[in-house]
Image: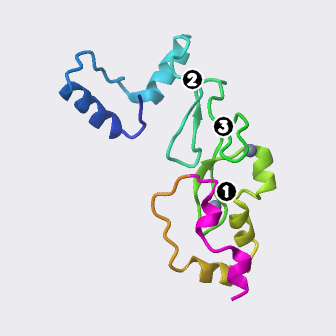
Amino acid sequence: MYCTGGIRCEKASAYMLHKGFKNVFHLEGGIINYARQAKELDLEPKFIGKNFVFDNRLGERITEDVIAKCHQCGMPCDTHTNCLNDSCHLLFIQCSSCAEKFDGCCSQDCKDTKHLPVERQKELRQGLDNGQKIFNKSKQRLRPRLDEMNGL
Ligand SMILES: [Zn+2]
Ligand SMILES: [Zn+2]
């Protein structure tokens, strides 16, 4: 288990100690420092793949392994992106061919919205709840379809 913010790992380790686990350790300097040290010492890192980070890079490659999948087509991919529809901005994993197909958006619905005039987009954005969203292939069905909305 790892986290990059120093919050979840603190909670998780305290919880594990509370539950009676004895061998609970923290990596000094966190996962980023660990990756750096492993590289310097030419050790094979136990962490494989990409480390998600909260700045614009959205990820720091540790090894060349790709252990995630594109959320849209399921192909091996570990590139995080934010949906380019301004009223969505969902954080999800998207391969380059899906990025092209969906114009950087998480769904056909968002792609359609992205191509509407900006004023119309602002109208549609009102009242939208963008709380804790996760990628969901069926989300288009939870909202009225754009063509229905346009027909009103
Ligand atoms: Zn894809
Ligand atoms: Zn979206």
| Three-letter amino acid code at the position of disc 1 | Cys
Packing grade of label 1 (10 A; few <14, some 14-19, many >=20) is many
- Identify whether 43 is placed above or below 59: above
Give the structural element (helix, strand or loop) at label 3: loop
Q: Are marks 1 and 2 in contact (CB under 8 Å)?
A: no
- CA–CA distance between discs 2 and 3? 15 Å
Label 1 CB, ligand 2: below 8 Å?
Answer: yes
In the foreground, 129 or 78: 129
- CA–CA distance between discs 1 and 2? 26 Å
Mark number, residue 69: 3
Q: Nearer the viewer, mark 1 or mark 2?
A: 1
Q: Please name the residue that numbered disc 2 is placed on.
A: 48
Reading the chain from its start, which is encountered first: label 1 or label 2? Answer: 2
Q: Quadrant of the C terminus?
A: bottom right
Q: Please name the residue that numbered disc 1 is placed on.
A: 106
In the foreground, 27 or 90: 90
x 58%, y 26%: residue: 62
Magenta-colored span? 135-152
For residue 9: magenta?
no
Q: Is residue 86 left or right of residue 131?
A: right
Label 2 CB, ligand 1: below 8 Å?
Answer: no
- Identify whether 6 is placed above or below 124: above
Q: Nearer the viewer, mark 2 or mark 3?
A: 3
